[in-house]
Amino acid sequence: MRSSFIDFEKISDPVVFQAHALKLFEYQFEHNSVYRSYCDLINRNPSDVNTIEDIPFLPIQFFKSHKICSLPKAPKRFFESSGTTGQIRSKHYVYELELYEKSFELGFKRFYGDPKEYAIIALLPSYLERENASLVYMTERLIQRTNHPSSGFYLNEWKQLEKVLIDLEKKQQKTLLIGVTFALLDAIDRFSFDMKHTIIMETGGMKGMRKEWIRSALHDHLKKGFGVDYIHAEYGMTELLSQAYSKGDGLFYSPPWMHVLSRAPEDPFEILPYGKSGGLNIIDLANIDSCAFIATQDLGVVYSDGGFEVMGRFDQAEVRGCNLMVI
């Protein structure tokens, strides 16, 4: 039955998405012991689930305390979330890296076209300093697919970075500069740019390196420093195999195999109508071998066209049912 979920990229409309999601829920209810225990704890089983809004969403904190797997065999590797020293980090066990690669490559192509058209420059210092970062894995593979000699990771080579970006601009080479927020700010503290052929994409992440910014002020500052009209953004996380992208103004869109809903802050089992702010629940149908239905700690708003905004995070959010984590 697992093989029937592998072609998630063929999902074309909401009706097909819902049918696929409901079948995957039944599969993971049956084969994922942690998810099954959570569903039992909240008294939810497949006979109660008729729409995607009925599906139980596993609190993301479980990835820190349990091995979330829907297969009995040993995984090929795991990805691990960032965190300060002493923090418990989430682990996402991956059985087929090919599924992850298919998801992020097709997702990128859907929003930006073939990676072969680009030079990709990565400013991800905090991620490069640790092992098992899914963002580094994704970016590294996309860089490899560009086959461009200037593509690569730049850590502290600021003068070289400036030279490469200016040279690419002169050649009118389509370029993607993807970086954590504090590294992009560091770049424009050192240099001024006038980018006409470069997409600036921030992945979030201050991690105590700088003061926190309001998104609109941050993007205005980055737009001025890089000389661009829009700041793009990537929304992904260790616990997912798919990403959403924003091409400006903080409005994200997902590929057809990923869907976002919002839940009431005071009742984690109530799905909110479009336009109401709440906790973000994510369905990622590429997450075949872990859990495809995740209640994140992000706050946001989902709109009727499928777009969503991220407004912040719950502080030490407690989700009903998390007492399972001590079982």
Image: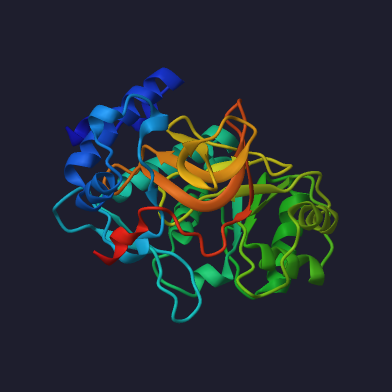
- In the image, taking residue 84 as reference, residue 164 lies left or right, namely right
- In the image, taking residue 269 as reference, residue 124 lies left or right, namely right
Residue 206 in the image, given as x and y percentages of width and height: 64, 68
Query: Is residue 281 or residue 269 the one in the foreground?
Result: 269
Question: Going 43% across and 58% down the picture, which residue do you hit?
Answer: 134
**Which corner quadrant of the image does residue 44 belong to?**
top left
* Quarter of the picture holding the C terminus: bottom left
Question: Going 67% across and 44% down the picture, which residue do you hit?
Answer: 174
The correct choice, above or below, for 292 with respect to 225 in the image is: above
**Which corner quadrant of the image does residue 11 belong to?**
top left
- In the image, taking residue 105 as reference, residue 187 lies left or right, namely right
**Which corner quadrant of the image does residue 178 belong to?**
bottom right
The correct choice, above or below, for 97 with respect to 12 in the image is: below
The correct choice, above or below, for 65 with respect to 209 in the image is: above
Query: Is residue 95 or residue 68 the one in the foreground?
Result: 68
Question: Going 35% across and 31% down the picture, which residue do you hit?
Answer: 8
Residue 273 in the image, given as x and y percentages of width and height: 57, 30
The correct choice, above or below, for 62 with respect to 310 in the image is: below
- In the image, taking residue 84 as reference, residue 66 lies left or right, namely left
The residue sitting at the bottom extreme is: 85
Residue 65 in the image, given as x and y percentages of width and height: 32, 65
Residue 13 visible in the shown view: no
Residue 225 visible in the shown view: yes
Q: What is the count of numbered marks?
A: 0
